[in-house]
Image (cartoon, coloured by chain):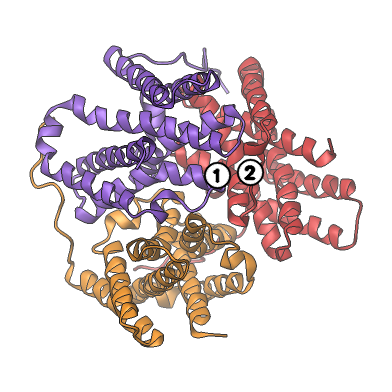
Chain colours: A purple, B orange, C red
Amino acid sequence: MNIQYILELAGTCFFAVSGALVATRKSEQDWFGVTFIGFITAIGGGSLRDMLLGSYPLAWVENVYFLYAIFAGILMTRLFYRQIMKRSKERFIFDTLGIALFTILGTEKALDLGVNPVIAAIMGMLSAIMGGVIRDVLTNEIPVLFRKEVYASACLAGAALYLCLDYFDADKNYNYFFSASLIFGIRYAAVKFNLSLPKFKVRPVDS
Amino acid sequence: MNIQYILELAGTCFFAVSGALVATRKSEQDWFGVTFIGFITAIGGGSLRDMLLGSYPLAWVENVYFLYAIFAGILMTRLFYRQIMKRSKERFIFDTLGIALFTILGTEKALDLGVNPVIAAIMGMLSAIMGGVIRDVLTNEIPVLFRKEVYASACLAGAALYLCLDYFDADKNYNYFFSASLIFGIRYAAVKFNLSLPKFKVRPVDS
Amino acid sequence: MNIQYILELAGTCFFAVSGALVATRKSEQDWFGVTFIGFITAIGGGSLRDMLLGSYPLAWVENVYFLYAIFAGILMTRLFYRQIMKRSKERFIFDTLGIALFTILGTEKALDLGVNPVIAAIMGMLSAIMGGVIRDVLTNEIPVLFRKEVYASACLAGAALYLCLDYFDADKNYNYFFSASLIFGIRYAAVKFNLSLPKFKVRPVDS
């Protein structure tokens, strides 16, 4: 029962809440549909990371507690739906806590498996964002990635900080805290001040 | 040449028919497009299950007969297209036979690999529904999962019955028959009487 | 430093350019979004092939030079964007070079892993087309596969030629050249003369 395992369960639960909130906004969803979307959002990113790394068995396949964390998230969403939806800040917080935790845990896991640090940072980012991307693809939304202000790039920044601190042998718990806080902070500032990255294309071309 | 293998080939063929029927309704599809969609529908769910479980090699990669089962399904669709399309019941039957067989075979396979029974039931459901979900995503449809009455939940019910009967050491062939029949029966009743699960969200919230 | 490795890096770079070109046409993309879509287009097909074959580690996870090839492609796209977009032929050429190379390399890799030649040809085709398909799904486009004239079928034809020449022990470099040229030639002719495969459904049915 280490800190890493607790954070992973917490991140899974946050993602399930975030998925269920997106699903309930689509009015026709039944209980099963909402649970399924919460499940996919929660396990999608980590499963993809592990399948890309060839690291088996997947955490949720081996350990049924991840499933319970998801069910807890869905139940919480149902019970506190009105309270959460009234406070727009809290909706955004579940997703942001999820991506902050998953980026750091994903980067660490990839690093432990011996891949190049640059690839480890990408794996951390993919664990964090791909659950939401798969959720958006399945519900026919434009993926969050291409809508939101500074989303996946905040994950990359946090992963870079994690790698730096890890390189200098920083204490693991402090490293978790500072790297995840950076991701949370960037996302919070981006939403609050409506920041975005510079556009790629300067002028349109008549083709 | 055991019963399990024959059922798996049959399920693959049914899914190929079901995929080809969906593809032909989109009028612009050429022969290749229809075959490709039939192929993806047939192998998508089982491949995802095996990739999540890390169970290699995939059945259709190792055994080329699965490919022949798909081609047989596509050819049947072409030859009997008018007859099938005139009878709306028969269209629905191919997909339902496919999900009934794949749920049971997928649950059994996951169980044989030693995963928790709850996870095995989810794996059975994913084998059954994800081929159709991938097909719908590729053809820009809203996934079947979120449109249809009692679809994936019928698979979970069948998987649960399979696990119960298996727990009490029921004969495998009877177990296949009863569990698959339950899935088929629930889906049939749901379509016939237009049943659906209770909605998740009771009242909308002004956000 | 063999020819196969250089061709793989080149194909990865071509796909990154092709992905970035598609992404920039969507005006709201920032630098990160364009890079991400280029990345997914470049690694999607090969990653899926290796995950289906259970062949780990994935090339880009093990070897960071694939990432540099992608960054080089993105940078080239930015620097020469106006020049490329003015010449519609050059836009089409990056994607076509990518699919030609990836089909042959994917078929060869699957064959080396001992799968049936028919399955190897399918694996070659999937490596070539699935990066673009995933790109289109993420950007909410109808997959290229179902829009374009003779696309994936050109890959299958090239893979078939590769398998034939390989069966007769042709020199590998000549085989690369002729098989890739066949794919390039078919695609070029299909676009130039607007060719397409025969439609699957002859007459509509009132259902």
Residue on which disc 1 sits? A52
What residue does disc 2 label?
C58
Secondary element under disc 1, as helix, strand or loop, is helix
Q: Is residue C43 left or right of residue B146?
A: right
Residue at image x 41%, y 48%?
B140
Q: Residue A83 falls in which quadrant of the image?
A: top left
Which circle marks residue C98 in the picture?
Answer: none
Residue A171: tell me if it is visible. Answer: yes
- In the figure, B115 relative to A207: above or below? below
Number of numbered discs: 2
The three-letter amino acid code for the residue at tag 1 is Leu
Left or right of B200 in this view: A62: right
Looking at the rendered structure, whether the residues under marks 1 and 2 are on a common chain is answered as no
Q: Position of residue A150 (x, y in %)?
A: 40, 20
**Residue C147 shows up from this direction:** no
The subunit letter for the residue under badge 2 reads: C
At 83% from the left and 61% from the top, the residue drawn is: C164
Residue at the extreme left: B203
Element at label 2: loop
Q: Is residue C123 above or below residue B96?
A: above
* Image quadrant where residue B179 sits: bottom left
C-alpha separation, residue under disc 1 versus residue under disc 2:
7 Å
Q: Chain of mark 1?
A: A
Residue appearing at x 36%, y 76% in the figure: B90
Pointers 1 and 2 in contact (CB under 8 A)? Answer: yes
Q: Residues within 10 Å of mark 2 (few under 14, many from 20)?
A: many
Q: Amino acid at mark 2?
A: Leu
Residue situated in front as seen by the camera: A17 or B32: A17
